[in-house]
């Protein structure tokens, strides 16, 4: 688990910056939206609605409100959704200095590592050239077994 917080020394975006972005889109900064943004701000990896719900102060809002809030925040470009192949949607705050990146996920324990940068820009350009598309994007996540899980398996 030693890479768990590999991303945590990255500069955390300030909460007022996020709420300002909400206001700029003429959206009300409700208690729930602010609390969700604050929570995501402090978590370097994508979270499910249920995980968010469990970490919010109890009684602040129900799961439906969280679903709606995440939908809105995604529409406004404040969060990005990820699919890690387990039918759950996970949300991560869009960090302006690391907006596009990929994840490496352990199938054993669910550890999530953030991979730096993207190695597919050239491929995108080639696809654009070949098919005449513009504004190509992609979603890609990597799966495997982490060191700790390999060791556990070896000693089991
Ligand atoms: Zn693992
Ligand atoms: Zn990429």
Image (cartoon, helix red, strand yellow):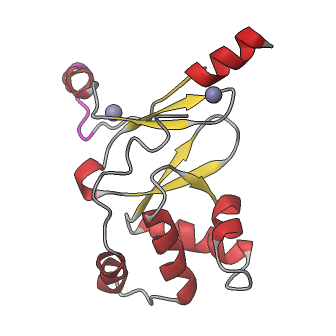
What residue is drawn where x is 23% and y is 19%? 130
User: Left of 77 or right of it: where is 154?
Assistant: right
User: Left of 124 or right of it: where is 3?
Assistant: right
What is the quadrant of residue 6 in the picture? top left
Image label count:
0
Identify whether 79 is placed above or below 142: below
Q: Which percent across, then down, holds residue 65? A: 66, 77
What residue is drawn where x is 27% and y is 25%? 119
Residue 122 visible somewhere in the drawing: yes
Q: Which residue occupies the foreground of this view, 124 or 46?
A: 46
The majority secondary structure of the magenta stretch comes to loop
Q: Which percent across, then down, holds residue 22? A: 37, 80
Instruction: Give the residue furthest to the right.
Output: 156
Q: Which residue occupies the foreground of this view, 15 or 75?
A: 15
Q: Determine if the magenta segment contains residue 131.
A: yes
Residue range corresponding to the magenta coloring: 130-135
Q: Which percent across, then down, holds residue 68? A: 61, 73
What residue is drawn where x is 81% and y is 13%? 156
What residue is drawn where x is 60% and y is 28%? 106
Instruction: Give the residue furthest to the top.
Output: 154
Q: Which percent across, then down, holds residue 121? A: 23, 28
Identify whether 113 is placed above or below 14: above
User: Left of 107 or right of it: where is 69?
Assistant: left
Identify whether 5 is placed above or below 149: below
Viewport quadrant of the N terminus = top right
Q: Which residue occupies the foreground of this view, 24 or 15?
A: 15
Residue 146 visible somewhere in the drawing: no
What is the quadrant of residue 114 in the picture? top left
Q: Determine if the magenta segment contains residue 106.
A: no
């Amino acid at each position: 688990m030693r890479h768990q917080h590999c991303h945590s020394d990255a500069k955390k975006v300030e909460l007022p910056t996020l709420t300002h972005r909400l206001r700029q889109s003429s959206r009300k900064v409700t208690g729930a939206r602010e609390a969700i943004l604050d929570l995501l701000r402090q978590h370097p990896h994508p979270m499910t609605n249920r995980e968010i719900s469990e970490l919010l102060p109890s009684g602040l809002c129900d799961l439906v409100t969280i679903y709606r809030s995440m939908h809105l925040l995604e529409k406004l470009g404040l969060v990005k959704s990820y699919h890690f192949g387990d039918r759950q949607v996970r949300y991560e705050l869009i960090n302006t200095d690391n907006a596009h990146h990929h994840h490496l996920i352990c199938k054993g324990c669910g550890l999530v590592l953030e991979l730096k940068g993207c190695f597919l820009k050239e491929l995108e350009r080639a696809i654009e050239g070949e098919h005449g598309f513009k504004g190509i994007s992609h979603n890609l996540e990597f799966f495997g077994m982490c060191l700790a899980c390999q060791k556990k398996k070896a000693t089991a």
